Amino acid sequence: MRTLAISLVGVLFFAPKLCAQDYRVLAQNLTQGGFLKAQAKNCQSYKIKEVNAEKAQAGHCTQDGFFIAGFSRDAGPTAELTINYKNGELLSKSLPIKQREYQIDRIEGVPQKTVTPPESVLTRIRQENGQIYAARNHFSEQTFFLTDFIWPAKGRISGVYGSQRYFNGTPKRPHYGLDIAAPKGDPVVAPANGIVRLAHPDMYYSGGTMILDHGYGFTSTFIHLSKLTVKEGQMVKQGDKIAEIGASGRATGPHLDWRINWYNVRLDPAYWVVEGGHKN
Ligand SMILES: [Zn+2]
């Protein structure tokens, strides 16, 4: 009884202070590959620690306190959101993360050298991975990531996020993109405003590759492109043509593979496009 009385006093004493700091959810998809978009007044930074992850992923809130927390493909059933306020206070909340079942894709007929790369290209692959890592981990203060996204290409969805892939019978990393099948040369447009952080005409695995920086660690990656029509450092607006669809790199036919990252956390682009959005 005595313990109860003391803890009640504790709750009454601390509760108003904690309630003063909260956040407002603007949109959310609490699932693997999903996100939480919110605003917390006087928010400085935030982080997400997935229950089964080794490390937390941290981000900065915008000047107006907006932030998006993303959840990885293999996020466990709960994730801890922590918000750091400018006055030093903290708010932690455990979020339930819905577990998904991913499909299995068996893809035959890709060039065998892209399934088991020869020794001679390993240095090249490592170097290209470094360029991709640098582009995705560049911090910039644009808030384009907060706007609604549109489809970057028009066509049939031929591959989805998360699927476990076998190339020519060999198990490989899961697929993190959304594939849109369309003829070679069809336009790829910017799904949201961004700055071109990487424009590479021919990477070993991904072929023609472009990374658009939407700000605060959020990037779009477009791969297998046949042509890039904008340059690194260039600012592009939503709907601007940035590239053409192709089948370069590890691909069996022309399609756009579009990925969204929050730094190195891979998110499902399907959750980012507004229904009925982009129509060419
Ligand atoms: Zn793909």
Image (tube, rainbow, N blue to C red):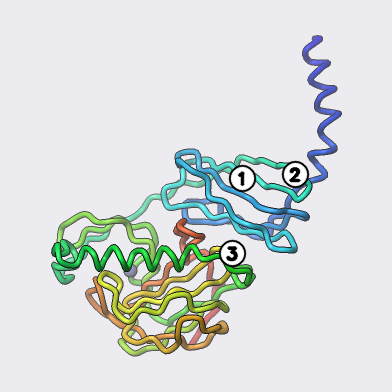
Q: Residue at x 43, y 71 (%)?
A: 221
SS at badge 3 = loop
CA neighbours of label 3 inside 10 A, class few (<14), some (14 to 19), many (20+): many
Secondary element at tag 2: loop
Circle 1: element type: strand
Q: Is residue 126 visible?
A: yes
User: Is label 2 within 8 A of ligand 1 (CB to nearest ligand atom)?
Assistant: no
Residue appearing at x 31%, y 85% in the figure: 226
Between the residue at mark 3 and the residue at mark 2, the CA separation in whole angstroms equals: 21 Å
The numbered mark at residue 88 is 2
Sequence-first disc among 1 and 2: 1
Residue visible at 24% across and 78% down? Answer: 253
Residue kind at label 3, given as amino acid type: Tyr
Mark 1 or mark 2, which is nearer to you? 2
Are the residues tagged 3 and 2 within 8 Å (C-beta)? no
Instruction: Please tell me which residue lies in front, 50 or 229.
Output: 229
Residue 223 relative to residue 66: left or right: left
State how far apart marks 1 and 2 are (Cα): 16 Å
Quadrant assignment, res 130: bottom left
Q: Position of residue 128 (x, y in %)?
A: 32, 68
Residue behind mark 3: 216
**How busy is the neighbourhood of tag 2: few (under 14 within 10 Å), some, or many (20 plus)?**
few
Q: Amino acid at mark 1?
A: Leu
Of marks 3 and 2, which one's residue comes earlier in the chain? 2
* Callout 1 crowding tier (Cα within 10 Å): few <14, some 14–19, many ≥20: many
